[in-house]
Image: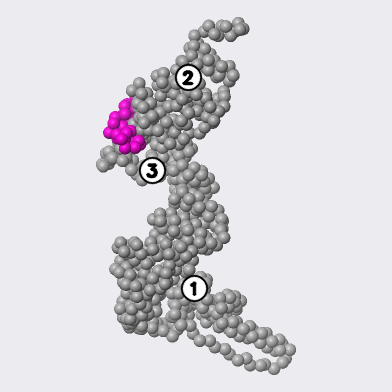
Amino acid sequence: MGLLSRLIARRSPAARLEHGLKLLEQEDYSGALSEISAVAKTGMPEAQFRLGRLYLDGEALPRDLVEGGRWIRRAAESGHVEAQFVLATFYLVGLPEAVENDSFDLSDVNKAATGEPNYPRAAHWALMAAEAGSADAQALYGYILTAAPEGLRNTEEALVWYQRAADANCAQGHLGLGLAGLHSAQTDEALAEAIGHLKIAADANIGSALYLMGIAYERGAGVPADLDAAVASYGKAAEQNIRSAQARYGLAYIEGRGIKQDMVRGETWLRKAALAGDREAAAMLGDIHARGGDLPPNYMEAATWYRFAAERGHATAARALGLLYLTGSGVMPDEEEAAKWFRFASEHGDSGGTADLGNLLLMGGGSVEDRLATRTLYEKAAHSGDLIAAFNFGVCLAEGVGADRDEQEAVKWMRKAAEGVVNAQYWYGRMLLEGRGVPANKPEGRAWVQKAADEGMSEARHHLAQLFVSGEGGPVDHTEALRLFELSAEQGNVGSMFALGAMYGGGHDIPEDRTKAQHWFGQAAERGHATGQLMIGRYLSRGLARHTDIEQGLDWYRKAEAQGVTQAVIERAQLEQTLKEAAEKKTNEEAGAPEEASEATTAPPPSVG
């Protein structure tokens, strides 16, 4: 044995540990590990704790959770308070079972944490450290008593330990008191006290406290509302990888609320939150890419984020993903995949998903199993008194979704649902007007359509306006029809836009106004209404509203032709013939040839329907 080795061996364990720690500071990892390991093997708790931390931190040797946990456990069993606290913390996140014994097995190396909290073991070690005076352990024990399963949970005792930790100036103790206060506060004073504890924790730079203070500032809960302070708190918490804070911080950048708008930074923070598992952030990213903005929408990217959120249980994102599959936006069109995500959204409480699934199945989409399962689901809920389900079940019966049509049974369910569902009022009215499943009763049918229209349903307003034009089931009133068409058009009903063009175009009991007629025909045409495209083509090519544009008129005729409007073919051919004859006439006049008269053409006015 060399002289240096003999001298080291004669030193006390404490001196050797101190020397090992100095070597560690000097980055002499081999020497440090040799010294600390030798002392730890003598049973010195501090050395055992230090060696355990080296293994856990991967400092001076490869990271090893199992071996590190074993040395921390040995130190804790020897009464090392900090080791007891660390061991309690590890039991909360789940330690490999191998930590419980001292035997070595190659299969133990690099084993990951189980992820399953062991609350009894965590409570045991946290209490030992807490009773020994560790303020951090007192706060941790309070948390365990708050979060543990029944049998171990004791929220009243938790408050006692949180208070002891807070009295020792432990920020985690204040965090615990603040969280408990938020849940129990019944008065403004109690809320302000809870926020006061959270602020102390936030001032100590605890991420979750910073996030909660951001919420408090944003909502003005327990403190004056201060959006700038809220965003600043979110930013600090986001830097500590609090994913909910990252999402809110990103949204603040996107919206320019409390901070200068920056779409790039906003999306960056939303991505961080989403990749950390925040499904709301992922759904927001989907919305951003689906809407576009300064750039065109990126539906492929939107689909990626909607799927990410939907797979984590986000109902609205699932519905949005279904719509992308239904329309083939960013993904290949797939009605079965659309039905899958609509069904998922519906099962997770999204009423829009339920409606979209029903509409898809009514159009023949989805699988046979989807249609049968949906019909069965609606039937069961309808029999339990759910009026919306009663309406949907009625639609299934009326349209033969999942089984054969049964209009007599359908009209019964529509009548029941009509007591509280606007769509059912409209459907029931239509069935009475058309005599579907029940003898026709036009006045009563019109009255039910009127009820749905009075509730603001666009389709009902459009249909009622048609009834006022035709007089079916009641009086004729073109002025009232015009009012209803306008209300429905404002809600985006394309049929009502076309009807307004027809009414203003003449032939009805309202003043003719071809400028307004052209406007509404144009609105309908731009939204794909085939006859609207014919009419705007006619108006522009003939200058019926004192504005002529032959080229645009021809373009609209061609669009109407593409949708199968025969009259558009005729009128375009007539217009092109007229233009040809006019060109020939001009050429002949310039050459001194005699004029030839051309025959004028006429076309019938459109009907409102």
Q: Are marks 3 and 2 in contact (CB under 8 Å)?
A: no
153 drawn magenta: yes
Image quadrant containing the N terminus: top right
Residue at far right of view: 591
Whether residue 332 is visible, yes or no, is yes
Q: Are marks 1 and 2 in contact (CB under 8 Å)?
A: no
SS for callout 2: helix
Residue located at (43% from left, 27% from top) = 87
Q: Which residue is mark 1?
A: 524
- In the structure shown, which secondary structural element does the residue marked by tag 3 occupy? helix
Circle 3 or circle 2, nearest the eye: 2
Residue 129: quadrant of the picture: top left
- Report which residue position mark 2 lands on: 48
Question: Please, is residue 373 above or below residue 93 in the view?
Answer: below
494 left or right of 142 in image: right
Mark 3 or 2 closer to N-term? Answer: 2
Q: Is residue 537 left or right of residue 609?
A: right
Q: Secondary structure at mark 1?
A: helix
Residue 165 x %, y %: 34, 27
Residue 392 magenta-highlighted: no
Q: CA distance from mark 3 to mark 1?
A: 46 Å
Residue span colored magenta: 145-168
Task: Residue type at mark 1: give it.
Answer: Ala
- On screen, residue 8 versus residue 388, left or right, reads right
Residue 185: x and y, percent?
Answer: 28, 40
Does the magenta stretch mainly form a helix, a strand or a loop?
helix
Mark 1 Cα-neighbour bin, 10 Å: few <14, some 14–19, many ≥20: many
Q: Label 3, on which residue? A: 215
**Cα–Cα span, label 1 and label 2:** 80 Å
| Closer to us: 184 or 45 | 45
Identify the residue shown where x is 50% and y is 28%: 66
For residue 13, the mark is: none
